[in-house]
Amino acid sequence: MAGTIMAAGQADTPAGTHPMAELHERELARIRSGQLDLAGLIHVTETLKQGGRPELAIEPYKSWIALNPDHPLLYAAMFNYGMALSDQKDVTGAVNVLRETVRLKPDFYAAQINLGSALERLGQVGAAVTAWNGVSTALPALTGENLNFKTIALKQLGRVLETSNSDALAEDSLRQSLELNPHQPDVIQHWIALRQRQCKWPLIEDVGQVKKAEIVAGISPLSAACYTDDPVFLLANSHRYCRTSIGLSVDPAEALPPLDPRQRCPGPLRIGYVSSDFREHAVGFSMTEVMEQHDRTVCEVFAYYCGVPAADATHQRTKAAVDHWHDLTGISDPDAARLIRAHGIDILVDLNGYTKDARTRVFALRPAPVSVNWFGFPGTMASPFHHYLVADETILPRELEYTVSESVLRLPCYQPNDRRRTVAAERPSRADLGLPEGAFVYCSLNGMQKITERVFSRWMAILADVPGSVLWLLAGTEEANERLRQAAAARGVAPERLVFADKRANPHHLARYPQADLFLDTFPYGSHTTAADALWMGVPVLTLLGRSFAARVCASLVRAAGIGETVCATGEDYVARAVAYGRDPASLRPLRERLLAGRDTCLLFDTPLLVRRLEGLYGQMAQAAANDVLPVPRLRGLDLAHEFGTGLALADSETLDDAAYRALYGRHLRETAAVYGGDALADMV
């Protein structure tokens, strides 16, 4: 909760006509002579800030506080002083001042909340939690103001506890915040994500006065992809998220001049990649060789990094591979857009989508003629400012193009891979990994947020039919691990048949894969880079082909790896095939041999081919822009589709066959078409 205490009526006082430096010196003289009261001090410092010299506000506060130690509102001046220091990135100074503010007035909750934020910025997470917890527990009867302070403190607690893997405590803090104020979409999003990460089923439930349909309406695009295989709802939900969290239009003061793509710089196409994940991250691992393989006679490569500070090998390798590297950390969205515009970028590629630390607002400012959604987010952006989505024939066949807003262009295989990935030389044994020597080992080394109740029940049915088999999972929190053990016992499977793998650096993670017999994919959000890792190490992957983007990527990968027979059409087929392989392990040997023999030649790992085809797509996009025929995103009717979708049993969408699914939305469209006209989904009817 940032901000400062404002002087009454100051908004009506015009800014001074003197230069800011002169104003600063004159008012300092008034402070020293005792002629400036607190209201005047606040007005002066706000004038300095509005005049573009916020750093000059610090000395007036410092001097006034030193000369007025007994003022009854000293705490207010101290608070504003602390916020001014924080704004100037003197976080240590801000902590000292805000601590003194809280000492002067312990019930000044705004100071406690901001003290917690400053402590967090210094890495003092425990102290930050203490500050916020003090607010949430010490408030008296809930007045309107105190209610606001408490909800903010609980939200901050939940956010920090989540990042420190205290998921249960974080979820409880966010639930309390929602009970106090149900109108917090960001809290709903984090609450759902936390429940997914803890495998809490059913996922959606009422929270205080917030009903299930309202919870569903607030789900984030990434969580929604883990929850439902309903691509129309996912399209509509992404559009709602874009409208409410990003904004469909821009402030005229921030808008860039219109572009004329016919006036582009001569020479190779200038391709800009925007990502927070050029580091040890699934996207970072996969994209490094793409950067290295680009033909510099065709493309000049710009990387715009917007992630956490990094210095790992993947980060350094990416920096070395591109022609131009720019860190957007600390740069505002308008300034970042102006920087990209100044570079004359022809095609700007969004490698984040709706994921953590994305800079989607930069794309909204349209700094380049063409914007592309590829690889960082498994689905449509449903925004007015993304023209193209890159996919392949398996992920988005023609008959499913109605489920995305962008114009679809296709690669032979959608997902890039790094053939130079490092595998640790030391290969652990099953005993080293806690796996039984003679057992059939199923694995699914995905994040727990992808494990739904239906998927887990299928896995337990598989284990029940393959005596002695075990399921090897990537560990979550110990509480989440225990929850899955109890869920296994409730389904008649001994809890010890679940084996949890610790998190390891990627080379060591890859080295342990060969101890698995068969990788079981999740659904509806399937394995992407995790599946590619398994296939690279020769482990067959069994997957279920769904309707939505995220539910079809794994099928694309296994087909591109040359083992398309492991793609299942139904959940029943998935269980039966997994059981058959488990009962006859020798039947997997040809698949393993095919994977290892074809690793250097199969489509999945042919990165040079992917890059050449990608450059061809970029050429098509640039030509379309030069001819002024860029595609217009299909967005009509999506608000109505979202409202309709929130009332459906979204977790059960996979139980509908294609005809029933299309008929469901077709009826809705027919019922609304007479009033609202046609929309982007009309071809479903």
Image (cartoon, rainbow, N blue to C red):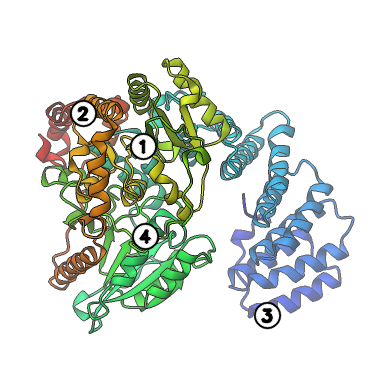
* Residue at screen point 73% across, 59% down: 94
Separation (CA) of disc 4 from disc 3: 33 Å
Residue type of the residue flagged with mark 2: Thr
Separation (CA) of disc 4 from disc 2: 44 Å
Q: Quadrant of the C terminus?
A: top left
Can you give x and y, in whole percent of width and height, for residue 585 in the image? 29, 32
Other residues around mark 2 within 10 Å, as few (<14) / some (14–19) / many (≥20):
some
Q: Nearer the viewer, mark 1 or mark 4?
A: 1
Residue type of the residue flagged with mark 3: Ala
- Quadrant assignment, res 29: bottom right
**Residue placed most toward the observer, 48 or 624:** 624
Disc 1: which residue: 226
Residue 262 appears in the figure: yes
Q: Residue 250: give its label.
A: 4
Left or right of 344: which side holds 658?
Answer: left
Label located before the other in sequence (1 or 3)? 3
